Amino acid sequence: MILMLDPHSPTPPFEQLRMQVIEGVSSGTFAPGDKLPTVRRLAEDLGLAANTVARAYRELEHDKVIETRGRLGSFIAATGDATHKQAQLAAIAYTERVRALGLGEAEALGIVAVALGIRP
């Protein structure tokens, strides 16, 4: 498993790590059950503080992209594509909110299209 940082990127290191793991899961580079390096090992390999790697791992675990099994370590979760799962949850929350506001389907879809930069 190769994770690298771009020291010139304006994106914080923890976010670069998080996005690389998510991208690896989405592309199939990382398979369910693949073991991640320990926080300390990855921090040493990348020249980062352990807290930076730990933050990336915590956020990935929160998003159900990885799972931590105590002393066994952290692994790519077997829950399917976490990115799509999070998008579906966001869509459900949006749907519930616009319905509570009394907006119709066409208006709600129009708002999403504009937010995505799609011109109807």
Image (cartoon, rainbow, N blue to C red):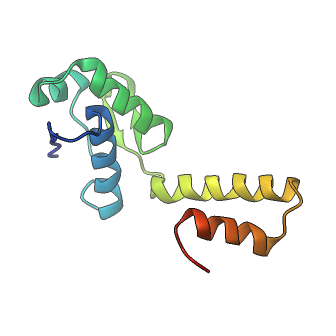
Q: Position of residue 43 (x, y in %)?
A: 18, 25
Q: Is residue 39 left or right of residue 82?
A: left
Query: Which sits in the foreground, 80 or 12?
Result: 12
Residue at 28% x, 27% y: name it.
53
Image coordinates for residue 40, horizontal then vertical, percent: 20, 21
Vertical arrangement, residue 3 with respect to residue 90, above or below: above
- The single residue placed furthest to the front in the displayed view is 119
- Can residue 52 be seen here? yes
Q: What residue is shown at x 26% (from left), y 39% (from top)?
A: 10
Viewer can see residue 33: no
> In the displayed structure, does residue 10 sit left or right of residue 69?
left
The number of callouts visible is: 0
Q: Is residue 48 left or right of residue 25?
A: left
- Give the residue displayed 84% in from the left and 59% down from the top: 99
Q: Residue at x 33, y 24 (%)?
A: 54
Name the residue furthest bottom. 120
Please identify the quarter of the rendering in which residue 101 is found.
bottom right
Check the image and report above or below for 71 versus 22: above
Closer to the camera in the image, 64 or 117: 117
Determine which quarter of the picture holds residue 45: top left
Q: From the viewer's perspective, is 36 left or right of 68?
A: left
Q: Is residue 68 above or below residue 109?
A: above
> Which quadrant, please, contains the C terminus?
bottom right
Looking at the picture, how far across and down is residue 105, in whole percent? 79, 72
- The vertical placement of 73 against 97, above or below, is above
Quarter of the rendering containing residue 58? top left
Task: From the top left corner, tell me how far across and down residue 116 is, in percent.
Answer: 53, 65
